[in-house]
Amino acid sequence: MIESTCSLLGAAEDEDREWTMEDYASALARWCPGCGDHAVLSAAQRLLETEQLPPERTVFVSGIGCAARFPHYMKTYGFHGIHGRALPVATGIKLRRPDLHVFVVMGDGDCCSIGAAHWIHATRYNANMVALMLDNGVYGLTKNQTSPTSPKGVPSNTQPRGAFLPPLNPLTATLGVTNASFVAQTADWSPPHLYATLLAAHRHRGFAFVRVLQRCPQYTTHLYDPAVKDSSLIELLVHPNGVVVPELDRLYKNQVKHDPADLAAARRLAEPDGKIRLGVLYRDETLPVYEETRAVPPRSGAEKLALLNTELDRYAV
Ligand code: SF4
């Protein structure tokens, strides 16, 4: 855990206080100027303030990559793990401490490559947490390597003649997993939409997977620049059960009513067709949640001892 237990326990003593964004801010973020990660950090801190999440009951978990610096910049508990393993760590935390608010921050390489198996199973487990996948289409920390979501033909240090394969689609992949309960897409350059999506994800009961289209001005500026400069390339998915951001009505004229309960429509909308869609594609709060299916009734010390003795007696000779 990154944050010192003493400082967070000190915070916990003052239960009546009101948390402000400053209370959640830790070290100065060292991402490149203009990096989309800064916007995601601000949105996350704003979310915690809105929801008044106590820092001592909030955990940010990450793997490896630029985005994985996230827990260092939050004044909550944090776990900066190893590459691709953020989700099993977070699932373990949630299983043992379902009372905690758990957030996972991954990059596209972290989640969709080395962490792909964990991503699929975490989606199926449907533990109640928010998983943010910051997708910049490149391994940025290791200086411009092709990632699973790099568009075909885009050159990098590892594939200088251009990516050989078409990119993996994180939305269709997640929507294809049994028990997937929340899938959304937002963008770092639209702070109101980003914040509203994070809020919806946090309030969702179950595993909320959010793909954040994230600008990397260092290596993949070209990726989202057209959509940043021309709002007509964006299509907003709007529905009361998704996210509705009235202040974006004037900017984004292309809006489509999409009921997130419709899985078949969500899968169609997730297919690449040249449009960048922002919104909640799918949401179902009736699906089984991992920590609830595995809930163990609380037991006293004497009861635990009796159970242990019963178990050991099976091996008595
Ligand atoms: Fe952000 Fe790219 Fe810099 Fe990494 S390399 S901090 S993703 S701009």
Image: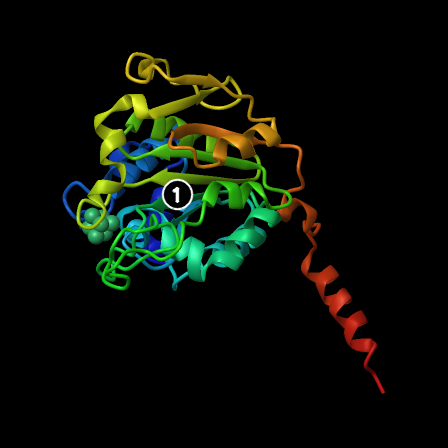
Give coordinates of residue 244: x percent, y percent.
43, 18
Residue at the left extreme?
Answer: 33
Give coordinates of residue 232: x percent, y percent.
30, 21
Say whether residue 51 is left or right of residue 41.
right
User: Where 315 sits versus 125, above or below?
Assistant: below
Give coordinates of residue 30: x percent, y percent.
18, 50
Residue at the bottom extreme?
Answer: 317
**Viewer can see residue 298:** yes
Q: Residues within 10 Å of mark 1 (few under 14, many from 20)?
A: some
Q: Type of residue at label 1? A: Ala
Residue picked out by circle 1: 12
**Viewer can see residue 102:** no
User: Where 110 sits versus 241, above or below?
Assistant: below
The quarter in which the C terminus is drawn is bottom right
Give coordinates of residue 247: x percent, y percent.
32, 14
User: Where 251 sits versus 25, above or below?
Assistant: above
Q: Secondary structure at mark 1?
A: helix
Q: Nearer the viewer, residue 31 or 231?
A: 231
Which residue appears at 40% of the width and 22% of the height?
236
